[in-house]
Amino acid sequence: MLVSGRAMTTANKITILRILLVPFFVVELLYYLRSGHEWHRRAALTAFGVAAALDGVDGYVARRFNQKSELGAILDPLADKLLMVSAVLALSWSHSAGLGQIPWWLTGTILGRDVLILLGIMVVRFTTGTVVVRPRLMGKWATVLQMTVVIWVLLPWDRGRGGPWLAGWCLGAAICTACSGMLYLWDGMRQFSAQPASAAIKK
């Protein structure tokens, strides 16, 4: 059952709440980086943790109560990208003694995959008129590991020292992110090649 894209379902309301938490998270994180006041870090960590938890809640509500909608199909990945991109960029530039730092090679992997997927969607949609993005388990693992990295960096006991645990989370997130990007690219190539518009023109 597909709910009309104009319907404001409970799942969509939860997703909108996730989007509204993003600017709050960014502002609190920037205030912490500027002032070093601990309550700003706690507020940023709480906002990110709630938004990350609601990522699973809105999906469960949509499946459990048949609230899948066209609006939700747009807002859900948008909420994920806004949250993760803002977090990894801010924490890659972080030079606070109270925080760890996300390595730029992980940030580049995350942003590179997202740009690749976006360009692929645009090409397939422009060429064939339709595109189907099929969720991948590897993509879900990548998201979970990315969120783990952010939370690990924000936790007070990390204190900028990184360590083997942070390096391990970053490596796992990078591998899953890169693999999921290749799988999405493979799906896009299959959709593209299955359309008559992609066939060679016979002279």
Image (tube, rainbow, N blue to C red):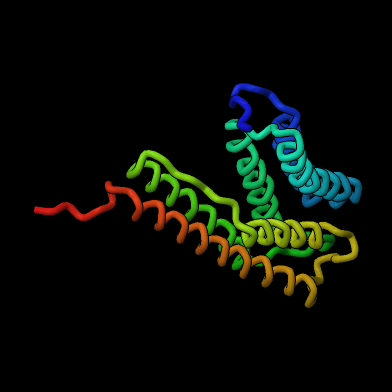
The residue drawn where x is 61% and y is 31% is 2
User: Outermost residue toward the bottom?
Assistant: 164
* Residue 116: % across, % down: 47, 55
User: Outermost residue toward the left?
Assistant: 203
Taking the image as drawn, is residue 118 in sight?
Answer: yes
> How many numbered badges does the structure rendering display?
0
The residue drawn where x is 67% and y is 72% is 171
* Residue 168: % across, % down: 74, 74
* Residue 152: % across, % down: 81, 62
Taking the image as drawn, is residue 23 in sight?
Answer: no
Say which of 16 and 106 sits in front. Answer: 16
Say which of 79 and 55 sits in front. Answer: 55
Q: Is residue 126 above or below residue 106?
A: above
* Residue 83: % across, % down: 69, 46
The residue drawn where x is 68% and y is 24% is 8
From the image, which quarter does the N terminus lie in?
top right
In the image: residue 2, left or right of residue 43: left
Instruction: Using the rendered view, name the quadrant where residue 82 is placed.
Output: top right
